[in-house]
Image: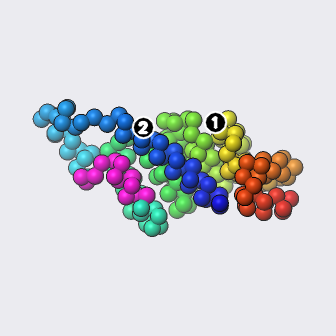
Amino acid sequence: MTTFQLLMLGASAFFAFKIFEHIQTLQNPEENKDSQNQDEAKSADAFSPFDPEALVEKADEAFEEKDFQRALALLSEADAKEPNNSEVLFKIAYILQQTNDNDGALNYYQQALDIDNNNEFIHNSIATIYKANGEFTSAKMHLRASLEIDDENPLTYYNFGNLLVEMQHPDEAIGMYQKALELNPDFSEAKEELEKL
Protein backbone atom coordinates (compact mmCIF):
# COMPACT_ATOMS: atom_id res chain seq x y z
CA MET A 1 0.00 0.00 0.00
CA THR A 2 1.47 3.35 -1.00
CA THR A 3 1.86 6.33 1.30
CA PHE A 4 -0.89 8.17 -0.56
CA GLN A 5 -3.23 5.19 -0.20
CA LEU A 6 -2.50 5.00 3.53
CA LEU A 7 -3.16 8.71 3.93
CA MET A 8 -6.38 8.53 1.94
CA LEU A 9 -7.53 5.39 3.82
CA GLY A 10 -7.00 7.10 7.16
CA ALA A 11 -8.62 10.31 6.00
CA SER A 12 -11.59 8.40 4.58
CA ALA A 13 -12.12 6.55 7.85
CA PHE A 14 -11.97 9.81 9.77
CA PHE A 15 -14.41 11.52 7.42
CA ALA A 16 -16.82 8.58 7.47
CA PHE A 17 -16.87 8.72 11.26
CA LYS A 18 -17.45 12.48 11.24
CA ILE A 19 -20.33 12.11 8.78
CA PHE A 20 -21.83 9.37 10.97
CA GLU A 21 -21.55 11.66 14.01
CA HIS A 22 -23.20 14.50 12.12
CA ILE A 23 -26.06 12.34 10.83
CA GLN A 24 -26.80 11.32 14.41
CA THR A 25 -27.44 14.97 15.32
CA LEU A 26 -29.68 15.89 12.41
CA GLN A 27 -33.16 17.15 13.24
CA ASN A 28 -36.31 17.22 11.18
CA PRO A 29 -36.23 20.61 9.42
CA GLU A 30 -40.03 20.84 9.64
CA GLU A 31 -39.86 21.14 13.44
CA ASN A 32 -38.23 24.58 13.44
CA LYS A 33 -39.77 26.24 10.39
CA ASP A 34 -41.29 29.64 10.65
CA SER A 35 -41.30 32.60 8.33
CA GLN A 36 -38.10 34.09 9.78
CA ASN A 37 -36.21 30.82 9.32
CA GLN A 38 -37.40 30.62 5.73
CA ASP A 39 -35.98 34.08 5.02
CA GLU A 40 -32.65 33.19 6.68
CA ALA A 41 -32.47 29.97 4.67
CA LYS A 42 -32.22 32.00 1.49
CA SER A 43 -28.70 33.10 2.41
CA ALA A 44 -26.36 30.05 2.54
CA ASP A 45 -28.85 27.50 1.19
CA ALA A 46 -29.56 29.62 -1.88
CA PHE A 47 -26.34 28.38 -3.51
CA SER A 48 -27.81 25.00 -4.43
CA PRO A 49 -30.42 22.55 -3.22
CA PHE A 50 -27.73 20.15 -1.96
CA ASP A 51 -27.01 19.71 1.72
CA PRO A 52 -23.38 19.87 2.95
CA GLU A 53 -22.99 16.08 3.02
CA ALA A 54 -24.13 15.76 -0.60
CA LEU A 55 -21.76 18.56 -1.59
CA VAL A 56 -18.86 16.78 0.11
CA GLU A 57 -19.74 13.55 -1.73
CA LYS A 58 -19.81 15.40 -5.06
CA ALA A 59 -16.50 17.07 -4.17
CA ASP A 60 -14.96 13.67 -3.46
CA GLU A 61 -16.11 12.47 -6.89
CA ALA A 62 -14.64 15.58 -8.53
CA PHE A 63 -11.37 15.03 -6.65
CA GLU A 64 -11.19 11.42 -7.85
CA GLU A 65 -11.63 12.75 -11.40
CA LYS A 66 -8.81 15.25 -10.70
CA ASP A 67 -11.21 18.15 -11.21
CA PHE A 68 -9.72 20.12 -8.33
CA GLN A 69 -11.42 23.40 -9.22
CA ARG A 70 -14.89 21.84 -9.10
CA ALA A 71 -14.03 19.98 -5.88
CA LEU A 72 -12.92 23.23 -4.26
CA ALA A 73 -16.08 25.03 -5.39
CA LEU A 74 -18.30 22.29 -3.93
CA LEU A 75 -16.35 22.21 -0.67
CA SER A 76 -16.46 26.00 -0.40
CA GLU A 77 -20.22 25.83 -0.75
CA ALA A 78 -20.40 23.11 1.91
CA ASP A 79 -18.26 25.32 4.16
CA ALA A 80 -20.65 28.25 3.63
CA LYS A 81 -23.65 26.09 4.50
CA GLU A 82 -22.01 24.42 7.49
CA PRO A 83 -19.14 26.52 8.80
CA ASN A 84 -16.50 25.14 11.15
CA ASN A 85 -16.67 21.58 9.86
CA SER A 86 -13.14 20.18 10.26
CA GLU A 87 -13.72 17.53 7.58
CA VAL A 88 -14.62 20.14 4.96
CA LEU A 89 -11.75 22.42 5.98
CA PHE A 90 -9.29 19.51 5.88
CA LYS A 91 -10.42 18.52 2.39
CA ILE A 92 -10.16 22.09 1.11
CA ALA A 93 -6.65 22.29 2.54
CA TYR A 94 -5.66 18.94 1.05
CA ILE A 95 -6.79 19.97 -2.44
CA LEU A 96 -5.01 23.33 -2.13
CA GLN A 97 -1.87 21.44 -1.13
CA GLN A 98 -2.22 19.21 -4.22
CA THR A 99 -2.37 22.35 -6.38
CA ASN A 100 0.82 23.72 -4.72
CA ASP A 101 -1.00 26.46 -2.80
CA ASN A 102 0.78 25.65 0.46
CA ASP A 103 -0.04 28.99 2.10
CA GLY A 104 -3.76 28.56 1.43
CA ALA A 105 -3.59 24.92 2.51
CA LEU A 106 -1.83 25.80 5.75
CA ASN A 107 -4.51 28.38 6.54
CA TYR A 108 -7.30 25.81 6.13
CA TYR A 109 -5.37 23.09 8.00
CA GLN A 110 -4.93 25.52 10.92
CA GLN A 111 -8.67 26.26 10.92
CA ALA A 112 -9.41 22.52 10.93
CA LEU A 113 -6.90 21.98 13.73
CA ASP A 114 -8.53 24.73 15.82
CA ILE A 115 -11.75 22.72 15.64
CA ASP A 116 -10.25 19.25 15.98
CA ASN A 117 -6.85 19.37 17.70
CA ASN A 118 -6.77 15.59 18.17
CA ASN A 119 -6.65 14.75 14.48
CA GLU A 120 -3.39 13.06 13.57
CA PHE A 121 -3.97 13.53 9.84
CA ILE A 122 -4.21 17.30 10.19
CA HIS A 123 -0.97 17.36 12.19
CA ASN A 124 0.72 15.14 9.58
CA SER A 125 -0.42 17.38 6.74
CA ILE A 126 0.71 20.55 8.47
CA ALA A 127 4.09 18.93 9.14
CA THR A 128 4.43 18.15 5.43
CA ILE A 129 3.95 21.81 4.52
CA TYR A 130 6.34 23.02 7.21
CA LYS A 131 8.94 20.51 5.99
CA ALA A 132 8.53 21.75 2.41
CA ASN A 133 9.00 25.33 3.66
CA GLY A 134 12.15 24.37 5.58
CA GLU A 135 10.47 25.04 8.94
CA PHE A 136 11.79 21.85 10.51
CA THR A 137 11.09 22.72 14.15
CA SER A 138 7.40 23.32 13.44
CA ALA A 139 7.21 20.16 11.32
CA LYS A 140 8.77 18.13 14.14
CA MET A 141 6.31 19.58 16.65
CA HIS A 142 3.32 18.49 14.56
CA LEU A 143 4.73 15.02 13.92
CA ARG A 144 5.25 14.56 17.65
CA ALA A 145 1.66 15.71 18.25
CA SER A 146 0.48 13.17 15.67
CA LEU A 147 2.40 10.37 17.44
CA GLU A 148 0.89 11.41 20.78
CA ILE A 149 -2.55 10.92 19.26
CA ASP A 150 -1.71 7.61 17.54
CA ASP A 151 1.68 5.98 17.96
CA GLU A 152 0.67 3.06 15.72
CA ASN A 153 0.44 4.93 12.41
CA PRO A 154 3.31 3.86 10.11
CA LEU A 155 2.77 6.88 7.89
CA THR A 156 3.69 9.25 10.72
CA TYR A 157 6.94 7.38 11.36
CA TYR A 158 7.69 7.44 7.64
CA ASN A 159 7.06 11.20 7.46
CA PHE A 160 9.18 11.71 10.57
CA GLY A 161 11.98 9.70 8.96
CA ASN A 162 11.80 11.87 5.85
CA LEU A 163 12.00 15.00 7.99
CA LEU A 164 15.02 13.67 9.88
CA VAL A 165 16.78 12.85 6.59
CA GLU A 166 16.14 16.41 5.46
CA MET A 167 17.53 17.64 8.79
CA GLN A 168 20.62 15.45 8.22
CA HIS A 169 19.94 13.11 11.16
CA PRO A 170 20.24 9.75 9.36
CA ASP A 171 20.62 7.60 12.50
CA GLU A 172 17.34 8.89 13.93
CA ALA A 173 15.68 8.53 10.52
CA ILE A 174 16.68 4.85 10.40
CA GLY A 175 14.81 4.28 13.67
CA MET A 176 11.69 5.96 12.28
CA TYR A 177 11.73 3.92 9.06
CA GLN A 178 12.28 0.73 11.05
CA LYS A 179 9.30 1.54 13.25
CA ALA A 180 7.16 2.22 10.16
CA LEU A 181 8.16 -1.20 8.77
CA GLU A 182 7.54 -2.87 12.12
CA LEU A 183 3.97 -1.56 11.99
CA ASN A 184 3.55 -2.25 8.26
CA PRO A 185 6.06 -4.73 6.81
CA ASP A 186 4.74 -4.06 3.27
CA PHE A 187 5.49 -0.33 3.42
CA SER A 188 7.64 -0.25 0.28
CA GLU A 189 8.45 3.47 0.43
CA ALA A 190 9.86 3.07 3.95
CA LYS A 191 11.95 0.10 2.76
CA GLU A 192 13.33 2.16 -0.13
CA GLU A 193 14.25 5.08 2.11
CA LEU A 194 15.85 2.77 4.66
CA GLU A 195 17.98 1.16 1.96
CA LYS A 196 19.31 4.59 0.96
CA LEU A 197 20.75 5.21 4.44
Magenta residues: mostly which secondary structure? Answer: helix
As drawn, the label of residue 21 is: 2
Question: Residue 16, position in %: x, y?
Answer: 46, 46
Residue 19 falls in which quadrant of the image?
A: top left
Q: Are marks 2 and 1 in contact (CB under 8 Å)?
A: no
Residue shown at 45% from the left, 67% from the top? 65
Q: Which of the two marks, 2 or 1, is nearer to us in this view?
A: 2
Per the image, the residue denoted by label 1 is 149
Question: Residue 63, position in %: x, y?
Answer: 46, 62
**Sooner in the amino-acid sequence: mark 2 or mark 1:** 2
Question: Residue 147, position in %: x, y?
Answer: 68, 39
- The CA distance from mark 2 to mark 1 is 20 Å
Looking at the rendered image, the quarter that the N terminus falls into is bottom right
Q: Residue 135 vs residue 97: left or right? A: right
Residue 76 vs 147, above or below: the answer is below
As drawn, the label of residue 196 is: none
The amino acid at mark 1 is Ile
User: Does the magenta run of residues contain 56?
Assistant: yes
Element carrying mark 2:
helix
The amino acid at mark 2 is Glu
Element carrying mark 1:
helix
| Residue numbers of the magenta segment | 48-60
